[in-house]
Image (tube, helix red, strand yellow):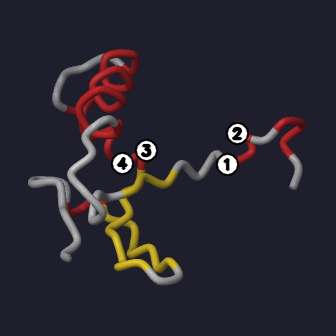
Amino acid sequence: MSMHKMDGYNDCVTGVILRANQAPILCYDLEAILQRHVDDGMTREEAIEFFEFNQLGAWVGDGTPCFLDKDWKAYIPGGEL
């Protein structure tokens, strides 16, 4: 099994995710990807919609990349661990 990558987004890679008993996967910086779409002429809303449907929603097997949202508190009720 190999890590899958998104063609043309090498500069958006933020690292590799290591998981117990699973192969490593590439991790992309969500904000860098969204900014790339905006730089290419999309609005922020269009960039999010494109990302969610075409990138986040693209399962290509166990080596599918993951995406890091550094605004992690937005996902946790109360914003605290």
Residue depicted at x 54% and y 48%:
69
Residue 74: x and y, percent?
Answer: 71, 37
Residue 32: x and y, percent?
Answer: 36, 48
Compared across the picture, whether 8 is left or right of 53 comes to: left
State how far apart marks 2 and 3 are (Cα).
Answer: 15 Å
Dots 3, 4 in contact, CB < 8 A:
yes
Residue 4: x and y, percent?
Answer: 19, 64
Disc 4 vs disc 2: which is toward the camera?
A: 2
Disc 3 vs disc 1: which is toward the camera?
A: 1
The residue indicated by pointer 2 is 75
Looking at the rendered image, the quarter that the C terminus falls into is bottom right
Dots 1, 4 in contact, CB < 8 A:
no
Q: For mark 1, does the 10 Å Cα neighbourhood hold few (<14), some (14 to 19), or many (20 or more) residues? A: few
Element type at marker 3?
helix
Q: Quadrant of residue 41?
A: top left
Q: For mark 3, does the 10 Å Cα neighbourhood hold few (<14), some (14 to 19), or many (20 or more) residues? A: some
Considering depth in this image, is 36 or 25 the residue closer to the camera? 25
The residue indicated by pointer 1 is 72
Farthest residue, direction bottom: 21
Element type at marker 2?
helix
